[in-house]
Image (spheres, grey):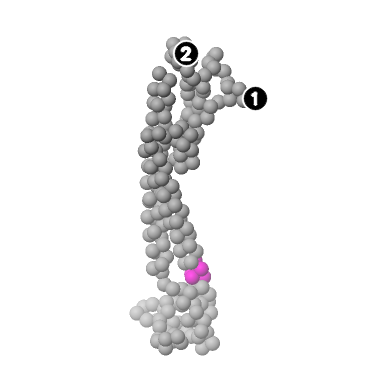
Amino acid sequence: IESELEAAALRIRREETLRALKRALSDCEKQRAQSEVATQSAEAEPNYSHFGNLLKAVLHLNPEAEKRAGKSIYRITDYHTGEEVFLPADHKMNSASEQMKRYFHQAKRQARKLSEAKGRFERAAARINRLQAALAKLEDPELSWETLEAIASREAGLAPLVQTMAPGGKKSARSGWGGRVFLSREGLSIWVGRDRDENLELTFKHA
């Protein structure tokens, strides 16, 4: 009886942990996908740092923004290539110097967005690897309570099944019950007998 109860309790805890791991894995996969989209979006933005450097190189010429196809632009020469380039201009900027500072500000924002998106992607990918490894461990037919509880609390985020103790390290007595008492995640008491006699007492006297 004792071994059957132990096996049933482990099975229930394993199934609960499995569900929690699968939910966490699904969430992480969504986070990784969102981070990948955010990374691609940041990488697709214009090279604002390059724009700032190009405009900085001609500030001494006092360039002025002009209209082209209904948009404000700076028409300048790229000294590295000798080609004429058109830089998008913000009509709210009063000078090329202000526009240059705006480019560099946008470049910093772009770099920060890219760094944060890549960081989220890497953390999600690492978490996915840990969750997949934990799921593989749950398939072990020889899975122990210690390993299961480590996975449940560390990876699945479940509250541990903690045996209640009275002050001084002694088990708390409830209505004369001297067996094991655990707390579920919801805070409910779970009574478990340590041997045949305690299980009989629990079934016919306390249950």
- Tell which residue pokes out farthest to the top in this image: 205
Q: Quadrant of residue 14?
A: top left
Q: Position of residue 162 (x, y in %)?
A: 52, 30
Label 2: how many Cα within 10 Å (few below 14, some 14–19, many 20+): few
- Tell which residue pokes out farthest to the right in this image: 168
- Of labels 1 and 2, the one closer to you: 2
Which quarter of the rendered picture does the N terminus lie within? Answer: top left
Specify the segment rendered in magenta. Answer: 105-109
Figure check: 197 above or below 134: above
Which quarter of the rendered picture does the C terminus lie within? Answer: top left
Q: Position of residue 191 (x, y in %)?
A: 48, 21
Mark 1 and mark 2: span between their CA atoms? 26 Å
Q: Which residue sits at x=38%, y=77%? A: 71
Dot 1 lies on which element?
loop
Q: Main secondary structure of the magenta part?
A: helix
Residue 152 in the magenta stretch? The answer is no
- Tell which residue pokes out farthest to the front in this image: 142
Observer-nearest residue: 9 or 70? 9
Figure check: 59 above or below 37: below
Q: Position of residue 70 (x, y in %)?
A: 36, 78
Observer-nearest residue: 185 or 69? 185
Observer-nearest residue: 80 or 66? 80
Q: Give the number of the disc on residue 168.
A: 1
Q: Amino acid at mark 1?
A: Gly
Dot 2 lies on which element?
helix
Q: Give the number of the disc on residue 81.
A: none
**On the picture, is 81 further left or further right than 160?**
left
Q: Which residue sits at x=54%, y=87%? A: 60
Q: Quadrant of residue 196?
A: top left
